[in-house]
Image (cartoon, rainbow, N blue to C red):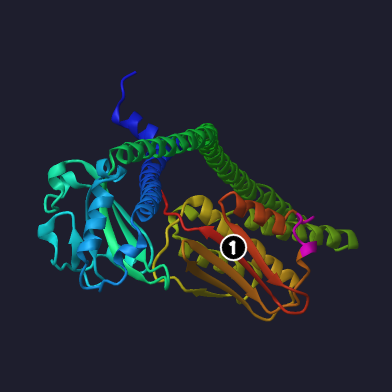
């Protein structure tokens, strides 16, 4: 399979690959730092031990009395001869290249090279260490120090500063600096350096490999879980879209069913008004024109016909609707308030807080009209209120229709059922609002009046 940029990005997203890149860099830097530190410590320790051993050997060959009685500013001829004899006539001849005898102020009192005698140099740190009573050692590859007088030898040297003490007082008399050939020491240091680097690299490689295995296992688990979560998310999104589509279909079906039911109720209302009510009116007129003698039965029949006609007309008015299709949402609210005042002889006021004419689908206008019709009728019949008010407003992306009364209130928990007289009641209103993704809020309690609000999404009417 070819490696594409996308596949490379997916590979780099792997936790184990990121760890390998970042952790490898960190471990390489750490290995270099630790390896360098360990190598320097090993070299320092080996050089110091070698210098101390060489210093003890030198001290054993040079009698302390050599420098007794001499001033610090000079070395006697006897002392100089003793030094030459010690360095040239003993086993040191093959090892020691040259030597210098230093005063405390940096003057060379004596030297293997006569031309160096009497020269003064700035005291080095190693020289100051020796004058404090400690042996100082330095390993130098003089091949890269061209300014050094012994650089022409081209061999690695061990530079040692040995303090020579007074056997009686223990004070340092002079410091003898000598350069010892250190080919074996150089080889030993190189081997120790290589061994230490190899050990550090092996330890870090092993730790890195173990950590990579652990991280890689965790990374594989994370990748599997990520794939599972991605699949679950895709499935959830698919189900969500499917549920949204089903919900939309259910809502549309409920709206169509409600509209169809309203049409049936409206037709029944028209049929009752134009059919049964007219026949009863005709029967009542014929009964009056029949010239029947007044009697209790005749009055009973006349009264029954008159009451039946009134009830049929009230029922037909409740079932029939105005032409809501041509009305705006504002007009629908105003029409519902007007129809209620005309039918019940009420004085409901309308407060329209909207700043423009609102348009809405037919189902929304039908819901609002039926809401006002039911709530105003309930308030007029049961609230025993003195004032009623309807308020229309827009809150965010919702239209809000509220009905206020100052009546006796009621217990909400006992009301949301269908009425026995055929009215919708709160339960029917709540269900009707729910089909349009709306809701009804009721704020009431016995003795404090009632506020019933209908909140519907403000949706523009589609043509």
Q: Residue 356 sits in which quadrant?
A: bottom left
Left or right: where does residue 65 sit relative to residue 457? Answer: left
Name the secondary structure under disc 1: strand
341 and 395: which is toward the camera:
395
Regarding residue 109, the answer to whether it shows in the image is yes
Residue 209 locus on image (x, y percent): 47, 33
| Residue assigned mark 1 | 454
Q: Main secondary structure of the magenta part?
A: loop
Front residue (pair 147, 383)? 147
Establish if 169 lies above or below 85. below
**Residue sitting nearer the eye, 342 or 19:** 19
Q: Is residue 437 above or below residue 107?
A: above
Position in image of residue 219 (x %, y %): 50, 35
Stretch of the chain drawn in magenta: 413-420
Which quarter of the rendered picture does the N terminus lie within? top left
Instruction: Tell me: 68 left or right of 423.
Output: left
Residue found at x 37% / y 45%: 39
Examine the image and state in which quarter residue 284 appears: bottom right
* Magenta highlight on residue 382: no
Q: Can the viewer see residue 179?
A: no
Q: Nearer the viewer, residue 144 or 78?
A: 78
Instruction: Locate residue 256 relative to residue 178 in the image: left or right.
Output: right
């Amino acid at each position: 399979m070819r490696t594409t940029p996308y596949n490379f990005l997916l590979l780099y997203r792997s936790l184990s690959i990121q760890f390998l890149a970042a952790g490898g860099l960190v471990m390489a830097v750490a290995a270099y730092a630790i390896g360098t530190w360990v190598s320097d410590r090993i070299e320092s320790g080996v050089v110091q031990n070698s210098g101390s051993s060489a210093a003890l050997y030198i001290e054993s060959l040079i009698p302390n009395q050599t420098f007794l009685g001499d001033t610090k500013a000079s070395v006697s001829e006897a002392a100089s001869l003793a030094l030459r004899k010690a360095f040239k006539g003993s086993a040191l001849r093959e090892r020691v290249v040259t030597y210098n005898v230093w005063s405390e102020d940096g003057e060379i009192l004596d030297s293997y090279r006569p031309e160096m005698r009497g020269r003064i140099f700035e005291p080095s740190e190693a020289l100051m260490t020796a004058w404090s009573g400690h042996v100082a050692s330095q390993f130098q590859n003089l091949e890269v120090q061209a300014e050094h007088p012994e650089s022409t030898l081209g061999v690695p040297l061990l530079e040692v500063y040995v303090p020579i003490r007074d056997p009686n007082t223990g004070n340092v008399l002079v410091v003898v600096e000598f350069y010892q050939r250190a080919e074996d020491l150089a080889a030993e240091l190189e081997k120790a350096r290589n061994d230490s680097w190899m050990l550090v690299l092996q330890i870090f490689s092993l730790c890195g490999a173990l950590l990579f295995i652990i991280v890689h296992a965790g990374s594989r688990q994370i990748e599997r879980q990520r794939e599972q979560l991605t699949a679950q998310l895709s499935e959830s999104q698919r189900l969500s879209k499917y549920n949204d589509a089903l919900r939309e279909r259910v809502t549309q079906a409920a709206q169509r069913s409600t509209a169809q039911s309203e049409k049936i109720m409206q037709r029944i209302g028209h049929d009752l008004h134009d059919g049964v009510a007219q026949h009863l009116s005709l029967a009542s007129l014929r009964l009056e024109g029949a010239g029947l003698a007044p009697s209790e039965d005749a009055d009973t029949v006349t009264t029954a016909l008159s009451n039946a006609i009134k009830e049929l007309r009230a029922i037909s008015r409740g079932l029939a609707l105005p032409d809501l299709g041509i009305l705006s949402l504002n007009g629908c609210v105003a029409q519902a308030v007007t129809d209620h005042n005309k039918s019940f002889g009420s004085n409901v006021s309308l407060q329209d807080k909207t700043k423009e004419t609102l348009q809405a689908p037919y189902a929304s206008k039908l819901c609002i009209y039926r809401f006002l019709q039911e709530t105003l009728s309930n308030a007029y019949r049961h609230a025993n209120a003195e004032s009623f008010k309807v308020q229309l407003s827009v809150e965010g992306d919702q239209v809000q229709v509220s009905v206020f009364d100052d009546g006796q209130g009621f217990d909400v928990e006992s009301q949301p059922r269908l009425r026995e007289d055929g009215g919708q009641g709160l339960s029917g209103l709540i269900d009707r609002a729910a089909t349009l993704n709306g809701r009804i809020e009721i704020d009431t309690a016995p003795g404090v009046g009632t506020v019933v609000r209908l909140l519907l999404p403000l949706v523009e009417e589609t043509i």
